[in-house]
Amino acid sequence: MRQDSIRHYQKDTFRFYAYQAGQAHYVARCLDLLLMGEGRTMDEAIGELNEIVLGYLESVHSNGWERELIPRPYGWRVWLHYYRLLAVHTLKAWTGQYFGGFLSFAQRVEDGRLVYA
C-alpha cells in the first residue's frame, strides 16, 4: 500500500540535512516538510527521518491534503541554522580541517523508498 500511495511524489525532490547536536546525539531534518528524526548516529537519525517522511507522504496522499501540506517548510530560524552549518563546514573543508558531523543532501521517492537525488 505504501508504494502505491507515495508513488505520486516521484517527481518531487526534498532537501535534508543532518548534524551532530551533542555527544552521541544526531538530528536529521527535512527542510521542505517540517519533519525531524534523531538518533545516536547520523545514519540512525537519517533512517528514522526517512521512515517519518515516507509515513507523512502516505498520510497526506491518503487524506488528499497535498495542496495544504506539501511543501511545508521550516521557518527562517531553522534555515538560518542550516546555512550557518553549511558555511562553517564548507570553510573547514577548504582549510583542510575536520568537517564531520554535518551532511546536506536531497532525496526523492523511487519505488516506495527515498533515494539520493
Image (cartoon, rainbow, N blue to C red):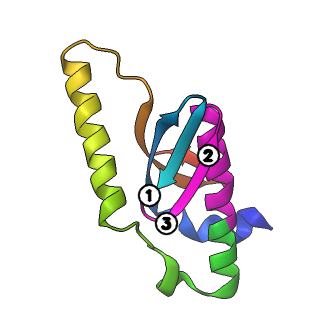
Can see residue 112? no
Badge 2: few (under 14), some or many (20 or more) residues near its Cα, within 10 Å?
many
Amino acid type, label 3:
Leu
- The mark closer to the camera, 2 or 1, is 2
- The mark closer to the camera, 3 or 1, is 3
Mark 3 or mark 1: name the one nearer the start of the chain. Answer: 1
Relative to 57, say whether 79 is above or below: above
Residue 101 falls in image quadrant: top left
Residue positioned 27% across, 54% down in the render:
80
Mark 2 or mark 1: name the one nearer the start of the chain. Answer: 1
Relative to 88, say whether 1 is above or below: below
Q: Residue 33 shows which numbered tag?
A: 3
Residue 75 lies within the magenta run = no
Relative to 36, say whether 103 is above or below: above
CA separation, marks 2 and 3?
A: 16 Å
> Taking 48 as reference, is 80 left or right?
left
Proximity of marks 2 and 1: CB atoms separated by less than 8 Å: no
Single out the residue that lies furthest toward the right. Answer: 1
CA separation, marks 2 and 1?
A: 21 Å
Can see residue 110? yes
Q: Residue 38 shows which numbered tag?
A: 2
Residue holding disc 1: 13
Badge 1: few (under 14), some or many (20 or more) residues near its Cα, within 10 Å?
some
Residue positioned 25% across, 22% down in the render:
92
Amino acid type, label 2:
Glu
Relative to 75, say whether 23 is above or below: above
Badge 3: few (under 14), some or many (20 or more) residues near its Cα, within 10 Å?
some
Q: Secondary structure at mark 2?
A: strand
